[in-house]
């Protein structure tokens, strides 16, 4: 396959990945519930999952209060530590629920979902940002994609300078509270799973 054909294929798949990532999220939830019917959740693993899930929810909520999609290249708040805090938060939440269920099949599905969907979507979004904001290359050189830097990257004065604080209005606008509601429902399903398996003597 030539380089042109490879680029064309990747561009096509990135477009598909953007369209199907939300529906596939519901598929992942159904897979989780199916695995829940097969495996009895263990309370100790549910407790172990809480730090990951809560950290992910906090990170997503924190990021949602800063990001101004397609209007501004956000470089403050969590975006001063990592370029994709929303995706990182989702990864932490998913990893937490994988720990809660301790299902190898679900863990494999999550890894495949990340590689086939998240990676090309992130690449597509970064291509858009690179074409839209002149300062994106400057930002990329200082802030990692998914593994956070410990100290915040400092934006200089001038055109690239940016200040900002958490906005609860932005949090509400992005409806990030839905993540917390979804997590609460999944934890409820885990507790119900324990009850149902115990009633059936599993």
Image (cartoon, helix red, strand yellow):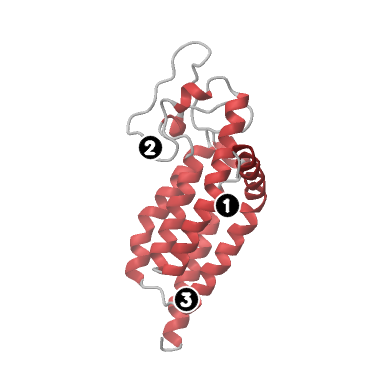
| Residue 72 place in picture, x, y as percent | 59, 26
* Among the two numbered marks 1 and 2 on one chain, the one whose residue lies closer to the N terminus: 2
* Among the two numbered marks 3 and 2 on one chain, the one whose residue lies closer to the N terminus: 2
- Point 40% across, 73% down: residue: 41
Kindly report the distance in space between the C-alpha atoms of the residues bearing marks 1 and 2: 24 Å
- Point 53% across, 20% down: residue: 135
* SS category of the residue bearing label 1: helix
Viewer-nearest of labels 1 and 2?
2
Question: Which mark is drawn over residue 193?
Answer: 3
- Contact, mark 1 vs mark 2 (Cβ under 8 Å): no
* Vertical placement of residue 189 versus 123, above or below: below
| Residue 172 place in picture, x, y as percent | 60, 41
Q: Name the residue tied to disc 2.
A: 148
Image quarter (top left, top right, bottom left or bottom right) of the C terminus: bottom left
Q: Name the residue tied to disc 1.
A: 178
Image quarter (top left, top right, bottom left or bottom right) of the N terminus: top right
């Amino acid at each position: 396959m030539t380089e042109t054909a490879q680029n064309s294929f990747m561009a096509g798949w990135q477009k598909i990945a953007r369209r199907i990532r939300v529906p596939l999220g519901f598929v992942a939830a159904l897979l989780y519930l199916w695995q829940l019917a097969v495996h009895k959740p263990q309370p100790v693993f549910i407790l172990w999952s809480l730090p990951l899930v809560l950290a992910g929810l906090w990170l997503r909520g924190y990021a949602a209060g800063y990001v101004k999609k397609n209007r501004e290249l956000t470089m403050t708040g969590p975006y001063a530590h990592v370029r994709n805090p929303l995706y990182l938060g989702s990864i932490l939440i998913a990893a937490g629920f994988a720990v809660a269920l301790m299902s190898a099949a679900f863990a494999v599905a999550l890894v495949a979902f990340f590689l086939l969907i998240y990676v090309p979507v992130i690449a597509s979004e970064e291509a858009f940002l690179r074409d839209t904001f002149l300062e994106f290359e400057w930002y990329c050189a200082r802030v990692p994609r998914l593994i956070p830097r410990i100290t915040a990257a400092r934006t200089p004065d001038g055109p690239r300078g940016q200040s900002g604080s958490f906005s609860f209005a932005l949090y509400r606008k992005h409806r990030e509270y839905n993540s917390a509601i979804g997590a609460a429902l999944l934890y409820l399903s885990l507790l119900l799973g324990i009850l149902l398996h115990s009633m059936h003597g599993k």
